[in-house]
Amino acid sequence: MESAIKVENLSKVFYNKKKETEKEREVWALNSASFEVKKGEIFGLLGPNGAGKTTAIRCIAGLLKPYSGSVFVNGENIQHETHLFRKKMGFLTENHGNYEHLSVYDNLSFFGSFYDVENLDQRIHDVLSRMGLYDRKDLRAGKLSKGQKQRLAIARAILHDPQILFFDEPTSGLDPIASVKVRELILGLKGKNRTLFINSHNLEEVQKICDRVAILDLGKIKRIGTPAELRKDLFKTQEMTCTLKNPVTQQMKDILAQFDTIKQFRVEDNKIFVYSDDIDETTPEIVKRLVSLDAKILDVNRTVHSLEDIYIKLMEDEELPK
């Protein structure tokens, strides 16, 4: 798949003037970070506070000049004529950035004036309808709820129909219901000609909406891939528990021992615990064979490690002494 964004050895250093030596003054927000975002995907950049996520998104969007490295958008280096690339991007900051003394409509009219949007008035009406804000178009932005303010900020980001959207902590500070609505809006923006780049430390949120994720810590990319790929990489075996109504027979144990894909299994009362490299592939065949032996299966439960499990495992492994 063609790439929308390609980052090569991106570094950004800030300087803390309060420190005594030049070495101590250097704060490396990004340190030779490299990754690629495919066209049409929702890509998540994960990491703790201070990991360099916002710096990365600002460098990629051309809002910050990197110390070194390159950023390519649709195959072109953004260091050349950065202002032209910005017109193809939409940007949602962690703080919504709405002008609270202006009406909802006037906020979009003001920001829309920076872009060559055909029939701006109609476009504003269309976007407000999509964001569920049309009936509040004449209300001052400061009177909106937190969730509505975030939806207005998203409306502003998509007003000029950009090819690439950047969302920095899109549900930060929102209540659970507002967060769900914003996630639904983000998923609705996905398309083959639009790429979404999301910065977040909310692991549950990223798992629900992102196709692939990169985990960033101390300015460096630790892992990148789909959640399934990261699970397979970090957790060498996966677990499945099969609960039977009838006892587990010796014949059932013998059948399980013949599976090459099973690393290990154990039996406790009427429960079978299976450990495999790829439990998704193994489970259907195990169930099929057990049923052929007259097993009365009550429940099959696969242990699927969440993105939170992956994140914690990765950080723990990085902290282990070499």
Image: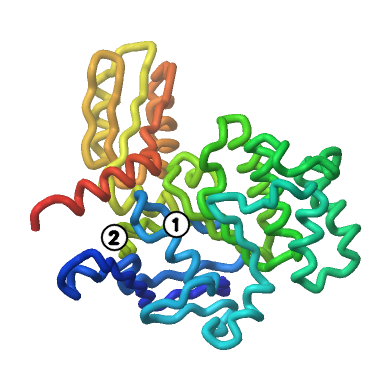
Picture layout, residue 33 above or below residue 168? below
Q: Which residue is mark 1?
A: 45
Going by the numbered disc 1, the residue's amino acid type is: Leu
Q: Which image quarter: residue 268?
A: top left
Which residue is drawn at the image coordinates 19% and 75% (left, top)?
22
**Which x, y percent locates residue 140?**
77, 42
Say whether residue 64 is left or right of residue 73.
Answer: left
Give residue 218's mark: 2
Q: Nearer the viewer, residue 278 or 172?
A: 172
> Which quarter of the image is occupied by the C terminus?
bottom left
Q: Position of residue 274 (x, y in %)?
A: 29, 33
As displayed, is residue 48 above or below residue 270?
Answer: below
The furthest residue to the top: 246
Q: Is residue 226 visible?
A: yes
* Most foreground residue, 227 or 75: 75
The disc label shown at residue 9, or none: none
